[in-house]
Image (cartoon, rainbow, N blue to C red):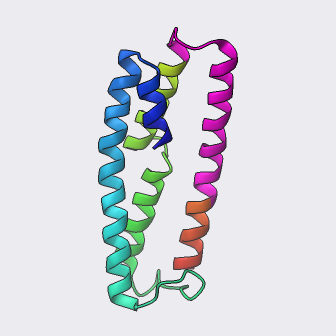
Amino acid sequence: MGFIIIGIGSITDMGLNRALLQIISHGFIGAALFFLAGTTYDRIRLVYLDEMGGIAIPMPKIFTMFSSFSMASLALPGMSGFVAELIVFFGLITSQKYLLMTKALITFVMAIGMILTPIYLLSMLRQMFY
């Protein structure tokens, strides 16, 4: 959601258009992940990640879909989240509204989010399915 705010705040056509793409992408990916979480709960009746484990073998289709939507959520290149985040970033850089120091600070915060998201999602996948 931070990329959407940054895209809107850049006040450039590129940033605003890709913020809209990020909104649509996040909506589809988020809905798919919530659907898969509900489907997984219906099948195994477990809520906590530390109780799950090894469910990749009995539910391979759910595992495949969960993995692919998780990779889309963390903006893996080739997926819709990557395109939106990359062009929001370029929209921020080309914006004339902010000073160089402000752009560097926002870029640093964006980089921290791009590092923490894969750590969280990959550890979630590992705990659930392996």
Q: Is residue 45 magenta?
A: no
Q: Is residue 91 above or below residue 65?
A: above
* Quadrant in which the N terminus is drawn: top left
Q: Is residue 113 above or below residue 43?
A: above
Q: Is residue 38 above or below residue 83?
A: below
Q: Is residue 94 magenta?
A: yes
Percent from the top left, x then y, of residue 35? 30, 69
Which residue occupies 36% across, 57% down?
30
Q: Which residues are magenta?
A: 93-119
The image quarter in which residue 38 lies: bottom left
Which residue occupies 37% across, 81% down?
40
The image quarter in which residue 5 lies: top left
Percent from the top left, x then y, of residue 27? 31, 50
**Quick check: 82 left or right of 62?**
right
Which residue occupies 47% across, 84% down?
47
**Quick check: 91 left or right of 102?**
left
Percent from the top left, x then y, of residue 120? 60, 61
Which residue occupies 60% across, 44% down?
114
Q: Nearer the viewer, residue 56 or 101?
A: 101
Q: Main secondary structure of the magenta part?
A: helix
